[in-house]
Image: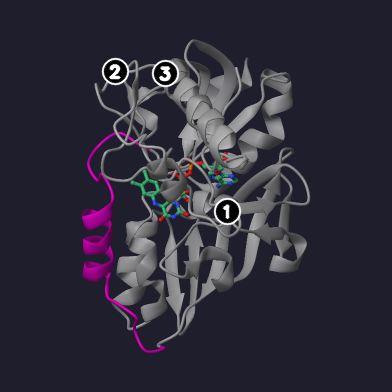
Amino acid sequence: MHLDCDFNIQHQVSLKKCNTFRVGGQARYFFEPESVDELLCFLRNKSSFMPDTPCYFLGLGSNTLFPDGNLDICVIRTRKLAGLSIEGHQVTAEAGLSCAKLAKKVSALGLNDAAWFAGIPGTVGGALRMNAGAFGGVTWAHVVSVLYADLQGHVHHFSPKAFHVGYRSVSPPFAGVFLSAIFEFSKAAAELDIKHYLQMRNDSQPIGTYNCGSVFKNPEGYFSAKLIDGLGLKGYRLGGACVSKKHANFIENISGNCSSQDILQLIQYVQNEVEKAYGIVLEPEVVIVKE
Ligand SMILES: Cc1cc2nc3c(=O)[nH]c(=O)nc-3n(C[C@H](O)[C@H](O)[C@H](O)COP(=O)(O)OP(=O)(O)OC[C@H]3O[C@@H](n4cnc5c(N)ncnc54)[C@H](O)[C@@H]3O)c2cc1C
């Protein structure tokens, strides 16, 4: 008997609906564990039924650019691992919980400094991996500890000291997957409530279109959006990909069926133009999955 019969592994799955750009080809394998235990069991046994296939851990795909074509990977989507428990100021959240739900449930208890999470359209796991942040808040400023599994399915309990955490960048001690985190939030005077944070996004970002948020990190001392806007690139189009007219650091799949290659070429075009004009190399924030 093949072990993969015991897990609900799908084959040749289109990734288009699994990311907010709505692009990408087909994953050879796709697995959505029902629980943390099932995920660990999968990892512990994977070497016996798909030894050479790399895993890609996927939250809500709001910061992932998959390539076109067939991908010899196993995408493991965490969105069913969505447990949440709150005790006083400490919040334990599983990796697949959406940041929006985290913000809503936690803020409702008066823990106001979780409200900024509301506008991050990803999961807790994605926020931990990216050190997502907005309006002055950053994910790792609230982390007390995490449960992290290596690719063999061994679980490690880590404090933040085990990770190198920077601006939209987190280096784990070894490859693996966030299973859950304990966060601490406070009842400190609220900057703004969820409604206001969402309103501010609506005013400045192309919400409701197919994009990945900010494509580039801000270089130290600069705003990528300002650099790009300064070159008149808002609305610049390449195939079905377009620099947003509303926010110059966003690229939109405007036709709804553009290719990943269109987006990649537009990223490279913008990088070249910015480097030529200012001598600054823009580093992508979006995670570009290689073929
Ligand atoms: C409209 C819009 C607005 C946005 N605004 C912001 C913003 O204000 N601030 C901000 O920081 N980001 C923003 N983003 C980007 C994105 O939402 C964040 O980076 C988010 O944290 C990604 O979460 P995700 O679950 O979608 O990650 P995914 O795109 O699924 O994955 C991103 C990375 O995290 C890894 N990953 C995912 N889950 C796990 C896990 N459990 N364990 C280990 N690795 C994992 C993936 O392998 C990948 O490397 C925005 C995106 C959009 C579309």
Circle 2 Cα neighbour tier, 10 Å, few/some/many (<14 / 14–19 / ≥20) = some
Q: Which mark is residue 257?
A: 2
User: Pointer 3 and pointer 1: residues touching (CB < 8 Å)?
Assistant: no
The residue located at (43%, 58%) in the rendering is: 83
- Is label 2's Cβ within 8 Å of ligand 1? no
Q: Please indicate whether residue 170 sits to the left or right of residue 85 in the image.
A: right
Q: Position of residue 191 (x, y in %)?
A: 34, 81
| Above or below, comparing residue 72 to residue 221 in the picture | above
Comes first in the chain, label 2 or label 1: 1
The chosen color scheme is one colour
Residue type beneath disc 2? Asn
Among the two numbered marks 3 and 2 on one chain, the one whose residue lies closer to the N terminus = 2
Q: Can residue 161 be found in the magenta stretch?
A: no
In this figure, which residue is indicated by the disc labeled 3? 262
The kind of residue on which mark 3 rests is: Asp
Q: Is residue 117 left or right of residue 284?
A: left
**How much space separates mark 3 and mark 2, taking CA atoms?**
10 Å
Residue span colored magenta: 188-211
Residue 9 appears in view: no
Foreground mark, 3 or 2, reads: 3
Does the magenta-highlighted stretch encompass residue 195?
yes
Q: Is residue 116 visible?
A: yes
**Quick one: label 3 or label 1, which is nearer the N terminus?**
1
| SS label for mark 2 | loop
Q: Nearer the viewer, mark 3 or mark 1?
A: 3
Quickly name the residue at label 1.
168
Q: Residue at x 49, y 25 (%)?
A: 269
Total tally of numbered discs in the picture: 3
| Residue 137 drawn at (x, y percent) | 47, 69
* In the image, the residue with mark 1 has its CB under 8 Å from the nearest atom of ligand 1: yes
